[in-house]
Amino acid sequence: MNDTAASHAAPASRIEISRRTALKLFTGGIAASLAGCSPPAEKNMPYVDMPEGLVPGEPQYYATALPLGGYGRGVIVKAVDGRPIKVSGNPRHPASLGSTDVFAEAALVELYDPERSRDIRGTQPINGWTDFLGELQQWSGKAKRGEAPLHLVTSTVASPTLLGQIAALKQQYPGMRWFAYDPLGDDESARSLIPRLDRASVIVSLGADPLGSGPMQIMASRAFINGRMPESPGGMSRLYAIESTWTLTGANADHRLALPPDKIDALAMEIVGRLEGHPGSPLSLEKGARHFVDQMIADLQGAGAGGLLLPGPMLREETVQAVLQSGKRRGAPLDRAAALPAQLRPEAFAAFEEALHSRKVQNLLLLDCNPAFDAAPDAKFANALKGVPFAVHAGLYDNETADLCRWQLPLSHPLEAWSDLTSADGTVAIVQPLIRPLYDTRSQHEILGFYAGQTAPSGYDAVRQTWNREPQDKGFEDWWRDALVKGVVSGRSPQFTLSAGNAEISPPASSQSPSDASAADGSFVALIQPDPTIYDGRFTNNAWLQECPKPLSKGTWTNAVSLAPEDAAALGASDGDVLAVSSSEGKIEGPLRIDKGQARGVVGLTLGYGRTDAGAIGNGLGYNPRLLSPGFQNVVPGVHVKKTDRRAPIPSTQMHFSLEGDLRKLLPEVAPGGSLPESGPKPSLFGPPQPRDPYSWAMVIDAAACTGCNACVVACQVENNVAVVGPDEVANGRAMHWLRIDSYNIGTAEEPRHGFEPVPCMQCEKAPCEPVCPVEASVHDTEGLNVQVYNRCVGTRFCQSNCPYKVRRFNWFAYNSGQEYKDLGEDPMPARNNPDVTVRARGVMEKCTYCVQRISGARRDAEKADRPIADGELKTACQEACPTRAITFGNLQDKGSKVNARRADPRHFTLLEELGTRPRTTYLARVRNANPKLAGGSA
Amino acid sequence: MAQVFKPRANTIALAILVSVPVIVVLVFIVNYQLHASPYATLMGLYVDQPIPFSHKHHVGDVGLDCRYCHTSVENAAYASLPPTHTCMTCHSQLFTNVAMLAPVRQSLATGTPIAWNRVYKLPDYVYFDHSVHVKNGIGCSTCHGDMSKQPLTVKEKPLTMGWCLKCHRDPGPHLRPASEVFDPHVPDPHNDPQKAVALLRHYVIETGNMTDCSTCHR
Amino acid sequence: MSAIVSGAEPLPPAGETAGAPQGERLTHVDTLDAVNTLVSGPLLDRRRWRRWWIAMIVASLLTILFFGSMIYLFYEGIGIFGNNSIVVWGYPIANYVWWIGIGNAGTLISSMLLLTHQHWRAAINRLAEAMTLMAVAIAGLMPIMHMGRPLYFYWLAPYPNTMALWPQWRSALIWDFWAILSYLLFSIVFWYTGLIPDLATLRDRAITPGKRIFYGALALGWRNSARHWHIYQTYYRTMAALATPLVCSVHSIVGLDFAASLMPGWQETIFPPYFVVGAMYSGFGIVVVLCAAARWGLDLESLITIRHFELMAKVMLMAGTVMFLSYATEWFSAWYSGRGVDRRFLTFEFTGAYAPLYWIMIFCNCIVVQAFWFRTVRRSLTAIVIISILINIGMWLERILIVWNTLSHHYIASMWRLFYPTLWDWLILFGSLGFFAFLYLLFARFFPVVSIHEVRELVHREAIR
């Protein structure tokens, strides 16, 4: 296995070169204009020794896992000629269920990022690793003698092998200290919960965001939608969201109430009290809110064990514990995420800072973490770190922390290294490399191996040892192979492992006390949350994630400061005005986003931005909210907001969000079991088109199941080589995403709500784009696809101007073929391109193709075997990625196909049906399970 | 006052007027002929190779099957060139120290691939799949000609889009029974309507989509 | 002497009985020779061209700017324009429609007025026809600058190729391609035909052998024989008869570029006719300006008289009123359709982001021209020129707004976006104006801007009355 993985590097480079030249040709358009006159000599380079099982140009699939916030999500990665080019979910893995999230999809950009740390950096002149190992030897000596004890700092660790190594090091080095932290904050107890949303009938989220980004997002979303489907047993669940700023959970709620954190905290206690039957004095709320709360609690009590009360990270630790206790008593469907074994617990980051500032730290290893940015971005910490004589940082990037350390060790990407990862629910997957390390890097295990005194540590061996505890174990090889193939480990347990279920979590000393956080003195409460596309700052240099629109605001390339309209008006500020937010600790500046439905007196901030040494892509974007908060405090009371005279409009992919009047029919909504007025295709003079082919592809998108997570958007981008255009071009309205998720403000002024609607190409049967193209670049094929022939397109753009759905995208510049944004054109980045999809030249129109390359692939396989393509055999990239299975794709002529069944659904509707374009992409209406006793309950 | 123009000026003027449309028409014709000619298509041209590999010898004289070297032709888009090891299966025994084969031995020794020059080249935006053609009764020689007669590989067909379409519009006359697919000597096209119909049915070929743009471009 | 004036002898056959317009005379010259001298004089005498040189320098600078930005455009890509993925069309399209419109008027004037025996056309038709050629040529450049891959523009033409591909005949752009091409070729022939007798005159009056050969070659041996004149008249009138439908077809088809779609504000059957009227409207506007310029620059006050301007003002008044009607029809049908999207679109036109421009457009195209109801205005050269310029500004705004409004405010609310022009958009627009002036000045330098023989005919007719 190792060999196969390793031997990939060679062909990778080979293909890359030939593609590059090919791309250059294509760019100039000379490829066609020279139509052969003198085609440049091209070389064919066969292998010297072909790797076993490799067929040139044919994809290979490997099961592995990718980390997010430390936890793993199982994935299956597609490699062509040794180049990983697509990540998709692993159906066998409970944290993936065959689906992905934006971070998994975009992991490839990280792998191929030209700015990754390539060489070890430290002494001058540098002799690579030998210098480092020499120095390491002296210091380990000291450490063993107890003179300079080893200090290890990590972020959340969920790798059994890594745990084992750390435990071993603790034996080896007396007085070694291990610190770990989660950049999102020290409020694990609320953050690391696995709500079993499919088993709940009434869900009340108290500022929790289970549907938002995070290691449990896929699990939670799938469970939530399973409990929401009208056909789901026990009827459809109802979700109440009580939160301060908009989250995906709030956007998907049936009822939502906006309150500041302290109010939510108090309300939580009230609810618990009333559920436990000893109501205290009710919290003072204005009339509407009070009515809302009473009805909600009634509903919750009615649900019994199906009633799920979900505490959010912004609550005080005591409150969280109280909520959890009452939940446990009522048997609410709520589990805890996998946690570290009691005998192997890291110390909190605060302890490390204390040690650092008291000059106790001389021998320091910072393993794959960036505290100088995401934990303590202050000069005090920086100076202290600079003073550490043997400070070693091992990471993918030469980042803010690395700059302060004596050594920067380049770390291998998870797709380049052997490891193992536990997922939030405790499932373990083996991480296997898809490609030999592109640079002279080492994996975490290998680096700890060096510290353990090995001269040539191998991650491969380390991982195998973890799982093969008795040396002569006959069954191991079979087990190992099976684990690699399945991507999920079963039947064996390593010495140290994380365990899910009811593991105890010691309540950390919670410094925050939101009760004193009232907006009375004109000050605000800042609420800090992970960014929906950049998360904690680990992905700041990832261009795909930067350009991926934030689910609700559709802003890109920066984080915003969000305020309630009333507060914004009070400041006399409008969208895009730069606001200065200051606390006792520090000051930040960011562009304002006015959020209808945000709690008054609350400033919404997100993590991950404001990096100074992320790389060309990520530097200088947005602000770092940690500057406001000591430690990991996510609720910062007493901040002051001032309007500056500068403006920095947020590059956005959507300008208009409201649906007045008859526009509302763009996104219809029904009650559970409800249906839309029957509306078949209108009669046509030409009659229905007669298919000349056994396949008629169609797609149905369930608007009720779309949580707006964006996984499909990025999946489409990866699969189809969709270009990144950069912030300026996004601001110019030139974002290239083939699949967009329209985000609309629906609901009333009292209770604003959000609706999502993914819009790919409609693949109209009577496509308006086709008759207007002067060169037949936009044509219909016999399977009903409305195909765009890039190499025929001359760029008159008549098709897009005549497209009622505006789903076409134009290459105003050579975004992907010569005029890339920043360093996106540099090697090895182009190696990520999917070889089955043309890289579009400048001046060419492009659009969603239903992943025609996959259709063609499936069709060729079928033709070779003289069999038809089976229903479900063929999946589009968006369909594959969707955590909630909102997208169905299939053959209309196969009467039994799932897509036909969906089209017969009473919720089925067609976008702009009155135009008679007869789209192949159709929708199922949103479903709102409103409480009849509440406003809008009649909806 | 002296005449400005001689009488023949009339003829010249007339000639100029007439020649304008004629020239326009000529431009179209010449341009087409040029692009259809070997000058543009490189059809029938030999390409020098680092090793003067002769299909004539290996296929014609020795009688190797195409698939012995082009292993993936039946199940992949690329027919693929043989790795150096394949050459050495024989040449570790035969002609072991012929100068001509030095590059092969060197490649094996140094592990550097042999850099062959491309003969059959399609643009990047054309997605051709060998396997689906071979599996559906299109013989190698339909596009590559009779390899058993080519000392150096020569581009036998123009490979223009028009040329592809001719077959995609009416594949019947170019189909063969599976047994003849790898036979370089089979004449192409066969002009036998019955055979064409029978083979189309045998290979279950849906001609409906064969001229869709999406069949080759994506 | 007689040799020199020979161009004027014998008098051309007087046209049909339909007399000259009643009341005051159209020209203020009495001898036919005076006409020859007036028109051809400047061309054959290089001492009278100072004004011309000044104008030429300005025009050349703008022309350089025009082609400079075009080169940069081809090098950098059309991303340099203000377009976005929603408003995919912009200035080049608007400029294109505008220039075509202007190009429309020339042949219209000469052919229609000829067929309807409007003899006053004699003084202005040459100007107008030349304008047509240059405007259409410039218009032809615009779609190429608009294209994403301009080097493949020839794919719109049906030429035999190894790809076995043809253009897509259902596309209005292809119809356009043919309409423009045929119109351009026809206009060249029509213009040149009208020029032949004058070239002969110039040949005969030329002093230097160089000029004599230049004009002589172009005159194709015209000898003013009665036979020549007979053939000429029949041929010229047949051409005129052919021209009229062509003129209408050209701009109707440009109208179809928009009408043959299903976007709100475009999908309207009224487009073809009102594009033609609009074309005539802006065309006459430019003709007025050119006449004024030529009159002033070449001292032709006695040939192009205020009477001409007054007549043109009347035509514009008519056209302007028709435009107003067309707009009103649009508004009505949008409201009357009852479709939400059309009504929203209408509201957007009047109150949306582009509303100020829309109001200016209505003012220029519909309101200002009403001043021509008053004789005093019709007879004031300055007034007419200013109004003509306003009209052309208005007509350009109309074209850009047709593009902007529809593409910015359509069916899907999430994709509503505005267009913000860049420097390059403006450079292309004003550069094209400069290029037009450049071509026109060259024409005025080497060819008679007024049809000598037709004015002679006119003078003769007025003399014998």
Image: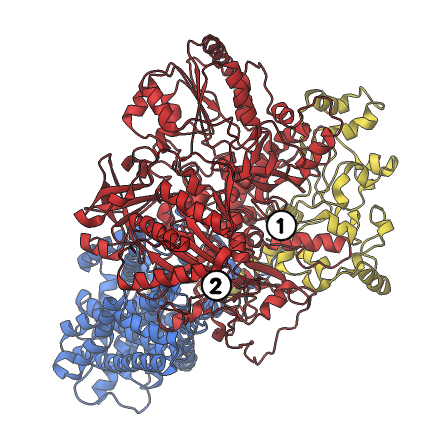
Dividing the picture into quadrants, the one containing residue A353 is top left
Q: Which chain is red?
A: A
Q: Which chain is blue?
A: C
Q: Residue C421 at x, y = what percent? A: 30, 56
Residue C2 visible (yes or no) = no
Query: What is chain B's hue in the picture?
Result: yellow
- Give the class, few, some or many, for how many residues have Cα within 10 Å of label 1's Cα (few <14, many ≥20): some
Q: Residue B200 at x, y = what percent? A: 80, 61
Indicate the quadrant containing the N terminus of chain A: top left, top right, bottom left or bottom right: top right
Three-letter residue code for mark 2? Cys
Frontmost residue, A256 versus B68: A256
- Give the class, few, some or many, for how many residues have Cα within 10 Å of label 2's Cα (few <14, many ≥20): many
Residue A863, placed above or below residue C396: above
Residue C213, placed above or below residue A147: below
Dividing the picture into quadrants, the one containing residue C104 is bottom left
The Cα–Cα distance between marks 1 and 2, rounded to whole angstroms, is: 23 Å
Badge 2 element: helix
The residue to which callout 1 is attached is B126
Q: Residue A475 at x, y = what percent? A: 75, 30
Q: Chain of mark 2?
A: A
Residue B85, placed above or below residue A139: below
Frontmost residue, C458 versus A772: A772
Badge 1 element: loop
Residue placed furthest toward the front: A278
The residue to which callout 2 is attached is A799
Q: Chain of mark 1?
A: B
Three-letter residue code for mark 1? Val
Name the side, left or right, on which A506 lies relative to C428: right
The image's colouring method is by chain
Q: Residue A715 at x, y = what percent? A: 53, 49
Residue placed furthest toward the bottom: C17
